[in-house]
């Protein structure tokens, strides 16, 4: 089963509570619901129930059956509502207050895609929308051309849409190079995420952050570090999913998780679960005390992606592999061969 299973929305919080209760009762050492990864497009990446028992495989297999079938029963019922691009832009345009954040849930490098989709931007241009900031758009060559031209340059530029026919065609436009920055970064909690040498261009009164390092959008300083004051823009658009998009949205709208909980409860709705997550920010989980759970994935391995974000050091990596360097074709790329298995 491949589906969207957000644990912040019913019925998933109650389902997770059942798994935790089974653990507390001693039925197994650990019972976990594994989210699928639909962007991977592989049956091996489907949703699963994993039970860790104390030497009792038959008992563990039996224990996994009922939660597994219950999880399967949620199929097709848990996906959040998504808007078509034009509908989302129209709602943002007609909003009485801003900034409004639109999250492109698919063009997210954290899910394995390139992060160079032009669909949102092209539609906004066609709708003659203004006062928009978009980031980031992955295009290393466009960044190099902007840096070579320099700030203030006005030139014809082809950017975005280079890697997939499903992410929109490249945009050909006359742009102004507003800002170039070397070794630009953005924040993720107390971590620093490198973006590389970035450029900010203006096209049709829309400001676009171009970057050479595929990266998710974690913080408003993705824009402000490139000279964009998002408070003066009605519509900052980001290529992100739930947690990071909500982080920027909360900043724009001046509302915290605790305030949101209070407002929801005041309307008569119970808020038993507030879900937080993200491996690089695992060590800042205490900064959101109102959260009742923290979801993570790769932090137990402390892999290279966490090292790149300065969240961990190489000494924290769970495994080192002895390899032979076959070649070094560029200064930042190497071809290696692991030692053969005996």
Image (spheres, rainbow, N blue to C red):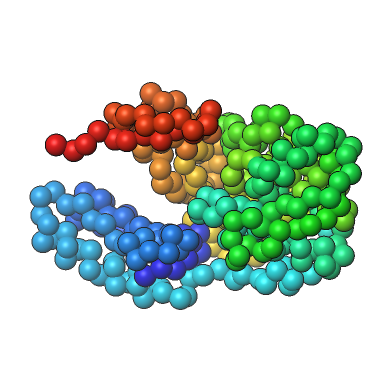
In the picture, the quarter occupied by the C terminus is top left
For the question of whether residue 274 can be seen, the reply is no
Residue at image point 60% right, 66% down: 166
Q: In this orientation, which residue lies closer to the viewer: 159 or 301?
A: 159
- Does residue 225 appear left or right of residue 320 in this picture? right
Quadrant of the rendered structure where residue 165 is? bottom right
| In the image, residue 178 above or below residue 137 | above
Q: Residue at x 29, y 68 (%)?
A: 68
In the current view of this chain or complex, which residue is farthest to the top? 315
Q: At which x and y percent is residue 217?
A: 63, 46
Please name whichever residue, 54 or 301, is drawn nearer the observer in this view of the structure. 301
Q: Which residue is drawn at 64% across and 55% down?
A: 162
**Residue drawn 29% across and 72% down?**
69
Instruction: Classify 109 as above or below 3.
Output: above
From the viewer's perspective, tell me whether residue 15 is left or right of residue 122. left
The quarter of the rendered structure image containing the N terminus is bottom left
Q: Is residue 326 left or right of residue 105?
A: left
| Above or below: residue 185 compared with residue 235 | above
Q: Is residue 177 visible?
A: yes
Residue 328 placed where, x, y %? 46, 30
Query: Total marks drawn?
Result: 0
Foreground residue among 281 and 214? 214
Where does residue 130 sit, x and y in percent of width and height?
Answer: 87, 58
Instruction: Pinpoint residue 119: horizontal percent, then vertical percent.
Output: 70, 63
């Amino acid at each position: 089963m491949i589906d969207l299973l957000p644990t912040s929305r019913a019925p998933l919080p109650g389902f997770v509570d059942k798994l935790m209760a089974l653990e507390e009762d001693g039925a197994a050492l650990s019972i976990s619901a594994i989210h699928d990864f639909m962007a991977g497009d592989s049956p091996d990446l489907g949703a699963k129930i994993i039970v860790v028992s104390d030497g009792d495989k038959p008992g563990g297999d039996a224990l996994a059956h009922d939660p597994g079938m219950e999880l399967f029963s949620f199929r097709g019922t848990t996906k959040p509502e998504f808007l078509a691009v034009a509908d989302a832009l129209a709602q943002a345009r007609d909003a009485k207050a801003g900034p409004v954040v639109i999250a492109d849930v698919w063009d997210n490098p954290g899910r394995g895609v390139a992060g160079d989709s032009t669909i949102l931007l092209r539609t906004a241009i066609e709708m003659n929308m203004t006062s928009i900031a978009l980031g980031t758009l992955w295009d290393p060559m466009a960044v190099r051309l902007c840096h070579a031209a320099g700030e203030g340059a006005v030139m014809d530029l082809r950017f975005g849409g280079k890697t997939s026919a499903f992410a929109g065609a490249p945009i050909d436009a006359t742009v102004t190079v507003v800002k170039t920055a070397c070794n630009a970064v953005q924040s993720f909690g107390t971590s620093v995420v490198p973006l590389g040498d970035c450029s900010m261009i203006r096209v049709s009164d829309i400001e676009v952050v171009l970057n050479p390092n595929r990266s998710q959008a974690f913080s408003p300083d993705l824009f402000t570090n490139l000279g964009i004051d998002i408070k003066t823009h009605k519509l900052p658009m980001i290529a992100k999913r739930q947690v990071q998009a909500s982080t920027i949205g909360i900043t724009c709208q001046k509302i915290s998780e605790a305030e949101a909980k209070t407002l929801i409860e005041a309307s008569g709705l119970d808020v038993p679960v507030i879900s937080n997550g993200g491996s690089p920010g695992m060590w800042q989980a205490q900064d959101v005390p109102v959260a009742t759970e923290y979801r993570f994935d790769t932090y137990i391995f402390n892999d290279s992606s966490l090292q790149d974000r300065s969240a961990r050091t190489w000494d924290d990596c769970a495994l080192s592999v002895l390899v032979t360097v076959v070649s070094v074709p560029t200064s930042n790329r190497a071809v290696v061969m692991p030692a053969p298995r005996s």
